[in-house]
Image (cartoon, rainbow, N blue to C red):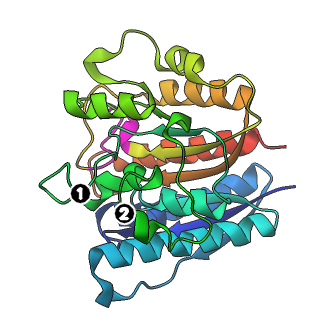
Amino acid sequence: MKSVEIILAPYHGGLREDRVGAGPIRLMEMGLKEALKHSCVETHVSDLGDIPECEGEVGRAFEVKRRVADAVSRAVAAGHFPLVLSGNCNAEVGTYAGLGSPDVPLIWFDGHTDFYTPDDIDHGYFDSMGAATLTGQCWQRLAKTVPGFTPLDPHRLIYCGSRHLEPGLLERLSATGVSMVEGGANRSEPFADALDRLLPTRVDKVLIHLDMDCIDPSEGMANQYAEPGGLTEKDLLACLDKILARSGALGLTVASYDPSQAGADRIGEIAIEVINRVMAHRG
């Protein structure tokens, strides 16, 4: 029987169940565990526990990464597929590290890129730095405190669904070697067709990151930052089929789902369908 470890990381800005931090708990309430069992998947659940309040947002957020890395490592050692349900995207650093920082492609579905550094922005939104941290663009010293972490080669990062991006950011992404299937007005063909051309042809395993605001708001609002021009459920599942027809998934992180938004349960249903689709492709 297939087995999955559901790792609950319900934090945003280091605060438990705040905004998108409530998403992991809501997915469980919506019957994720039961849906997996119905698909003959053995399920195990773990929770990161309480994060100390005294370290500030950055300190708490890196503690989340460290705990995610430990939980993913334990899950893999026990023979379970690691499914990380996270408040925000920073947890991907922990997922990747917990897998041993594998030399594999990372397919990152997101309405944004999270590729900012502290010197690129003036609003200080820490969650916008997750992919930049992952690829060694910033927070290098703290990233070294995450067990098993080494930076991901940007050439192995493939975005799908990011949109409304500033020209300067697009230039920097291109310069670092990141690949992208843009959403919004710059999309000229189906997402799945464009992604298929970017996927490596001789790779057995990939890592998948799903930020729920890759989904177009016509399906429901994943969070307050969701913008038009994203993927429909049909688009997302078609993309997954392209990925999984070529490669198995090493792990899956689902993030940035705020159940307080309009139409949020529809977004939750899509997330559960994606999780089931990924598990169905595992041998």
Looking at the image, is 244 positioned above or below residue 74? above
Determine the secondary structure under disc 2. Answer: loop
Note whether 180 is above or below 28 in the view shown: above
Q: How would you classify the magenta stretch by its main secondary structure?
A: loop
Toward the right, the furthest residue is 1
State how far apart marks 2 and 1 are (Cα): 9 Å
**Relative depth, front residue between 216 and 49:** 49
Q: Is residue 75 left or right of residue 124?
A: right
Residue pointed to by mark 1: 118
Whether 17 is among the magenta residues is: no
Query: In the rendering, which numbered label is found on residue 139?
Result: 2
- Residue 95, image x and y in percent? 57, 59
Task: Name the image quarter holding residue 242.
Answer: top right
Q: Is residue 268 left or right of residue 239?
A: left
Horizontal and vertical percent position of residue 98: 63, 64
Question: Would residue 80 be visible to someone looking at this image?
Answer: yes
Horizontal and vertical percent position of residue 118: 23, 57
Q: Nearer the viewer, residue 176 or 59?
A: 176
Local SS, label 1? loop
Q: Determine the image quadrant of residue 229.
A: top left
| Coordinates of residue 40 in the picture (x, y in percent) | 80, 52
Image quarter in which the N terminus is found: bottom right
- Cβ–Cβ below 8 Å for labels 2 and 1? yes
Q: Residue furthest left?
A: 122
Residue lying at 67% horizontally and 59% vertically, measured from the top left: 99
Are there few (<14), some (14-19), or many (20+) residues within 10 Å of tag 1? some
Q: Point out the tag, 2 or 1, that comes first from the N-terminus.
A: 1
Which amino acid type corresponds to the residue marked 1 in the rendered image?
Pro
Q: Which residues lie in the magenta part? A: 213-223
